[in-house]
Image (cartoon, rainbow, N blue to C red):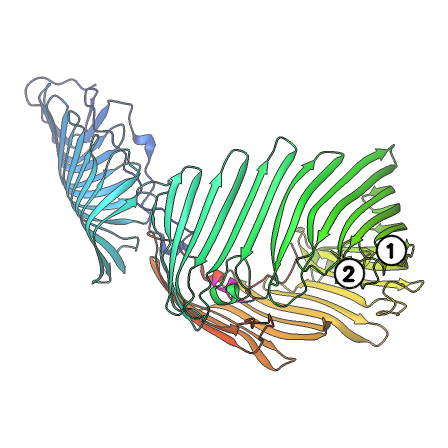
């Protein structure tokens, strides 16, 4: 410690260092006023240099450095010229400073700067009192440390007891010199230990134009969840008219919260939307409720609603409970009012509730599955309940035994439809042999299924059916690879042939109803599945050989640059279960292609060709150019020759591209070539600066409304337009790319290359 006498000691030409051990400077923590919601572009971030905490001292210590000093021991110390004052919580720089009251008070003037862990302040003058635990600064300009928020204030008062008070203060997240928007308040106060701050007489400016005045509002000052209004959603469409939704977030407890969103639609009235979430040590869940008491656009006065309840929870170490319960008031609810969980092409609303058990050798599940059917479609059977058990037991080093069993009761909402109790047991004895170069597997399965069917009058069904089938499967594959030089690059080329022989015995199943059975769509991998249907009500007989091959080109970074697969089934005997619809001696030739041309071009294609007439049965192709994360163009085509009696032939194009500095647009269009008409047109444009953005989105698509008889109209269109303002730092926003995900079809990456 520098020792001085009671007389003045002046050293104008030497750097003076004074360490005071008796000054307890006010140790205050400033909360963060705003939290960044998403990653900013590097050019937009104007963050001050990080605060160097290593410069801070130990508790109750202050170090003063200056060009000159005059010290009266235990009375007054005056410093001049490049004065640096360092405490245990902050660093102060000024032209002049005084330490008085036996080291309990500090004042500084002349180009004063104050820095701590939360902010950096430039001020005309500063005073600190350790006795009253206060700090005062006048005529200030401040910058939040580690965040882009900054502003100015005529006066800043910080107190250990009362917190922070800022008089005539402004705030913005825009870079210096580019303040496109700012908040101005007569006073902002933040009490010590509180999670909410208060602002009085607040004006919101866009440029120099005031656009909003609030006499009072509260705002969060920590990263804890806080109750309050969220940004509204504003749009317009032919279905809803002017659409304004105002969410309110309610932070009920640390593990409970709720969002309440009144929605005003000029064409339909006022709807209430709510979301409740909860989280415990062993479970989590959410409940969504939407209710429209009176739709003014409809002739009827019926209320309209939608609900969704989801729950996942652990019951001990190996038990889990799951719930996914959904309900809807009418066929056109999703078409008219929209949904975050379903789209207008969905035909069922599901309800499932069940428990699961899992261990090394036993898996068990018990579920109740119910459905609401949208439109005039055949009601789907409900499983009330459905229990499944799988037992796995190795038998020595080579053999393995697996037993799959299921017990289910199927009911239907229509009283004249059959109901059934189904009991199924299928033990499988397998001999797997797997090595790094390939695998060989032999399996033998016996499948016994018992049905007890009721309400079968006037049908070909029988009350009791006991069906026993046997299945044998031989599968083999090889993994061959070599290193090669392709186009000047070191690559690994693989060849993966595989072959399967499958035999399944035949039994007439026309006396069994269809309860959870539909035809499956095949791809290259599906050819080796050996099953033409979902569920157990139809198990097709097989006597067939399936051949397939896959080749990959892998670069030095272990990325797949090229993948091609081919597969086909050769029938050694007619499949009698499907003989009335398919009497070919071989299946369609299935092919898949994924190709990364270079770092920007990708193509994904699948095709199935009927080899008896060389016609394409199904195909899809996606070609995408991706310059960077913000710039892409995608073209797609989908063709299905026969899907429930309809031909699907659709062409689509999607694009996302910057068009100028700060300007970005997204467009998408899908066309039905079979009917020569548009299905969906979508366009969005956004201006985005460092601190604000505005987005305009327009869309026109098929409405797909249902009439009173449940028949879907495929000739009416719905148009909508939406406008959204985003002010960064005081709200959240989705990125440019997310505009692609909106609309009927949305954007999907076309490839599966890693």
Question: Where is residue 101 drawn, in percent x and y?
Answer: 10, 23
Asked which quadrant contains residue 91, the reply is: top left
Q: Secondary structure at mark 1?
A: strand
Q: How many marks?
A: 2
Indicate the quadrant containing the N terminus: top left, top right, bottom left or bottom right.
top left
Image coordinates for residue 289, horizontal then vertical, percent: 47, 52
In the image, taking residue 427 as reference, residue 143 lies left or right, namely: left
Q: Residue furthest front?
A: 457
Give percent across and percent down for residue 489. Answer: 69, 58
Structural crowding at the residue carrying mark 1, measured as other residues with C-alpha within 10 Å and reported as few (<14), some (14–19) or many (≥20) = some
Q: Earlier in the sequence, mark 2 or mark 1?
A: 1
Q: Which region shows up in magenta?
A: 739-745
Disc 2 crowd rating (10 Å Cα; few below 14, some 14-19, many 20+) is many
Residue 499's tag is 1
Q: Name the residue rendered at 87%, 54% in the picture.
A: 500
- The residue that appears at 52% across and 40% down in the rendered structure is 284
* Res 134 → quadrant: top left
Find out whether residue 742 is within the magenta segment: yes
| Residue on which disc 2 sits | 524
Image location (x, y in percent) of residue 705: 54, 71
Residue that lies at the very extreme toward the bottom in this rendered image: 676
Quick check: is 417 in the magenta stretch?
A: no
């Amino acid at each position: 410690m520098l020792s001085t006498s009671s007389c003045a000691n002046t050293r104008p030409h030497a750097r003076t260092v004074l360490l005071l051990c008796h000054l307890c400077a006010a140790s205050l923590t400033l909360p963060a006023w705003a939290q960044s919601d998403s990653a900013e572009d590097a050019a937009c971030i104007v963050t001050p240099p990080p605060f160097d905490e290593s410069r801070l001292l130990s508790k109750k210590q202050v170090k003063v450095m200056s060009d000159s000093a005059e010290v009266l021991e235990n009375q007054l110390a005056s410093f001049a010229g490049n004065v640096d004052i360092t405490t245990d919580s902050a660093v102060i720089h000024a032209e002049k400073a005084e330490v008085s009251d036996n080291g309990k008070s500090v004042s500084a003037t002349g180009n004063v700067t104050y820095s701590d862990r939360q902010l950096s302040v430039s001020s005309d003058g500063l005073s600190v009192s350790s006795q009253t635990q206060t700090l005062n600064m006048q005529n200030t300009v401040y910058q939040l440390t580690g965040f882009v928020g900054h502003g100015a204030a005529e006066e800043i008062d910080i107190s250990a007891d009362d917190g922070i008070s800022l008089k005539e203060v402004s705030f913005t997240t825009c870079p210096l010199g580019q303040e496109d928007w700012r908040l101005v308040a007569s006073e902002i106060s933040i009490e010590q230990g509180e999670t909410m701050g208060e602002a009085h007489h607040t004006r919101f400016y866009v440029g120099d134009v005031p656009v909003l005045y609030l006499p009072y509002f509260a705002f969060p000052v920590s990263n804890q969840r806080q109750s309050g209004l969220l940004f509204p959603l504003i749009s317009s469409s032919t279905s809803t008219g002017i659409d304004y939704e105002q969410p309110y977030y309610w932070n009920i407890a640390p593990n409970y919260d709720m969002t309440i969103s009144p929605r005003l639609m000029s064409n339909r009235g006022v709807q209430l939307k709510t979301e409740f979430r909860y989280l415990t040590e062993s479970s989590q869940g959410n409940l969504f409720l939407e209710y429209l008491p009176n739709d003014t656009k409809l002739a009827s006065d019926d209320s309209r609603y939608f609900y969704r309840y989801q729950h996942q929870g652990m019951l001990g170490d190996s038990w889990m409970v799951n719930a996914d319960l959904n309900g809807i008031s009418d066929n056109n609810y999703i078409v008219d009012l929209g949904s975050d969980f379903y789209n207008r092409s969905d035909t069922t609303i599901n309800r499932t509730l069940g428990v699961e058990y899992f261990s090394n050798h036993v898996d068990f599940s018990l579920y109740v599955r119910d459905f609401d059917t949208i439109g005039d479609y055949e009601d789907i059977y409900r499983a009330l309940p459905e229990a499944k058990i799988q037992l796995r037991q190795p038998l020595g080093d080579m053999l393995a035994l697996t037993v799959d069993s299921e017990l289910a009761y199927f009911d239907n909402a229509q009283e004249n439809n059959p109901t059934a109790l189904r009991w199924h047991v299928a033990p499988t004895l397998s001999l797997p042999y797997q090595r790094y170069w390939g695998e060989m597997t032999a399996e033998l399965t016996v499948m016994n299924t018992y049905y007890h069917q009721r309400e079968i009058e006037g049908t070909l069904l029988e009350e009791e059916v006991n069906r026993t089938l046997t299945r044998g499967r031989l599968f083999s594959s090889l993994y061959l690879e070599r290193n090669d030089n392709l186009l000047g690059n070191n690559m690994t080329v693989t060849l993966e042939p595989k072959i399967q022989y499958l035999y399944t015995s035949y039994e007439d199943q026309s006396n069994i109803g269809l309860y959870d059975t539909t035809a499956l769509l095949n791809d290259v991998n599906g050819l080796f599945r050996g099953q033409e249907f979902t569920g157990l009500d139809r198990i097709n007989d097989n006597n067939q050989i399936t051949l397939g091959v896959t080749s990959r080109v892998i670069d030095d970074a272990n990325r797949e640059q090229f993948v091609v697969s081919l597969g086909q089934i050769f029938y050694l005997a007619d499949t009698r279960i499907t003989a009335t619809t398919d009497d070919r001696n071989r299946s369609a030739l299935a092919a898949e292609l994924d190709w990364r041309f270079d770092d920007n071009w990708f193509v994904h294609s699948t095709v199935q060709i009927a080899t008896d007439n060389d016609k394409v049965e199904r195909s899809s192709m996606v070609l995408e150019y991706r310059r960077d994360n913000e710039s892409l163009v995608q073209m797609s085509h989908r063709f299905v020759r026969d899907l429930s009696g309809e031909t699907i032939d659709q062409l689509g194009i999607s694009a996302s591209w910057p068009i100028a500095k700060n300007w970005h647009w997204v467009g998408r269009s899908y066309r039905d070539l079979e009917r020569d008409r548009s299905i969906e047109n979508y366009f969005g444009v956004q201006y985005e600066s460092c601190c604000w953005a505005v987005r305009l989105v327009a869309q026109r698509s098929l409405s797909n409304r249902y009439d009173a008889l449940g028949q879907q109209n495929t000739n009416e269109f719905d148009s909508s337009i939406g406008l959204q303002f985003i002010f960064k730092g005081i709200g959240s926003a989705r990125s440019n790319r997310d505009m692609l995900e909106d609309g009927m079809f949305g954007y999907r990456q076309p490839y599966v290359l890693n």
